[in-house]
Image (cartoon, grey):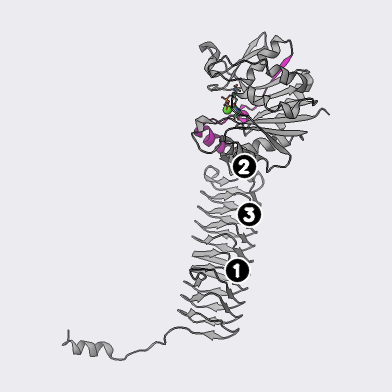
Amino acid sequence: MIPVHVVILAAGKGTRMRSATPKVLHTLSGLPMIDFTLRAAAALEPASVTVVVGHEADRVKAHVERTPGVRTVLQEPQLGTGHALLQAEPLLAGQEGVVVLLSGDVPLLTGQTLRALLDVHRRADAAATVVTAIVERSYGYGRILRRSGSIVRIVEERDASPAEREIKEINAGIYAFDLPPLFEALRGIGAANAQGEYYLPDLVAVYRRRRRSVATWTVPNAGEIRGINGRSELAEVNRMVRQQKNEELMAAGVTLVDPATTYVDVDVLVGPDTVIHPGVHLEGSTRIGGACEIHAGVRIVNSTVGDRVTVLNHSIIVDSTVEAACSVGPFAHLRPGSALGEGARVGNFVELKKTTLGAGAKANHLSYLGDATVGDGANVGAGTITCNYDGVSKHQTVIGKGAFVGSDSTLVAPVVIGDDAYVAAGSAITSDVPPGSLAIARARQENKEGWVSRRKAERGGQ
Ligand code: UD1
Ligand code: CA
């Protein structure tokens, strides 16, 4: 096997994005777009992966180097795609094999397509192979110029004549190059063009002049090589990524009531027979079990949800765990570090933060539970509030197994409500409640009989 070296160009400013964020770090379905390219590259089991960074180099470098085995080279200043590839020379000089060149802004490309490119390149025995596509709207892409069927040159949009602009075969910006002649030939590229840049596609003409063979391979699916240059293309490609994810989910037995308004990030997993209603967002590393029902307007981020869970409308779950057969919402908010045991129930207008509910525990209405542990089967009444913050530090509340906290109680932490204890409604609990006892912490009610009529008499019968 000939070694494959992948080089990904990601140094450009991405001017057309009009963004403070480098283009390749803009996200598609929750992942920076360059991650798609890195994943496709990994399918080639390459000997090396080099990312050329330049504009906002530190941010791009810090991000891509999180992927094991990925290294970066700096292109400074950024003088075009040909100049960008030249920066990888010190890392690749003297090596054998094939360079597969990718752009950080072409995220839909699959590993399968890259393997096909290598196949074509080997079989054609060419010094370079250019990936092309036939597209309806060729605006903005380099056009492929052929003579007697063979590629002779690539001309960029800005340098093309009106007749050349009519050409529908475009340069995908993806190439395979045999290593030895590559860098020496790259130095033969000039910058006499509309942008005064060293264009990598000019390598085709350089190779032709030097009588080196250049092959082309036209991808069957032109959608795959869509480049992202502006926000509108970002939105369009995002929709394509999302659609594909939705297709995968449905193929795996998930019901999407309305795929057009279902937003599931690429790495999310959902079990079979789960039903997802419109307007649901499942983000990051979220895992949803089987036979769940996720109602409209729910957002779940980096969380794990077990089987047979119902999440009712407009609930938000972030960095939390929900075990099997729970019910959450509507309008519930599980903030980071929350965990629901099997069959627990959290109802409307309940907010949890770093709070654990045991199996079968309930907090059904209008509560704030922060830094709390609620035991199995405990019932937290409507309007219960844990006063976990004294203005300086956060404190823990512990509610024991089977405990019953009456409505509208305030639990001033740190405080422990023992197992099976009762708290009377409307109590302000400031000290621990022993197991099995009843705590009442409110003024005793007094009824003044005849008070209304006495007052009327005092006011002269008014
Ligand atoms: C490029 C090709 C064009 C092709 C299209 C496919 C050139 C000159 N043109 O055009 O033929 O049809 O891709 O999508 O190559 N970059 C650097 N350093 C630079 C300039 C760019 O690393 O100095 C990187 C960019 O970050 C980007 C990639 O190279 O990831 C492509 O650059 P871009 O400016 O987007 O080229 P296009 O105009 O799309
Ligand atoms: Ca581009």
Work out whether mark 1 precedes mark 2 in sequence or the reverse, and give the earlier one.
2
Residue 222: within the magenta? yes
Q: What crowding class fits label 2: few (fewer than 14 Cα within 10 Å), some (14-19), or many (20 or more)?
A: many
Which SS class for mark 2? helix
Residue 364: within the magenta? no
Which SS class for mark 1? strand
Residue at horizontal 59 percent and vertical 27 percent from the top: 78
- Alpha-carbon distance for marks 3 and 1? 19 Å
- Alpha-carbon distance for marks 1 and 2? 33 Å
Residue 348, x across and y down, in percent: 49, 64
User: Considering only vertical position in the picture, is 66 above or below 11?
Assistant: below
Judge whether residue 295 can be spotted in this image: yes
Residue at horizontal 56 percent and vertical 35 percent from the top: 23
Q: Amino acid at mark 2?
A: Lys
Q: Amino acid at mark 3?
A: Ile
Q: Quadrant of residue 54?
A: top right
Work out whether mark 3 precedes mark 1 in sequence or the reverse, and give the earlier one.
3
**Residue denoted by label 2:** 245
Q: Which residues are magenta?
A: 213-239
User: Considering only vertical position in the picture, is 255 above or below 181?
Assistant: below
In this orientation, which residue lies closer to the viewer: 58 or 225?
58
- Alpha-carbon distance for marks 2 and 3? 15 Å
Q: Amino acid at mark 1?
A: Leu
Numbered mark located on residue 288 in the image = 3
* Drawn side of residue 406 relative to residue 451, left or right: right
Looking at the image, in which quadrant does ligand 1 appear? top right
User: Considering only vertical position in the picture, is 124 above or below 300?
Assistant: above
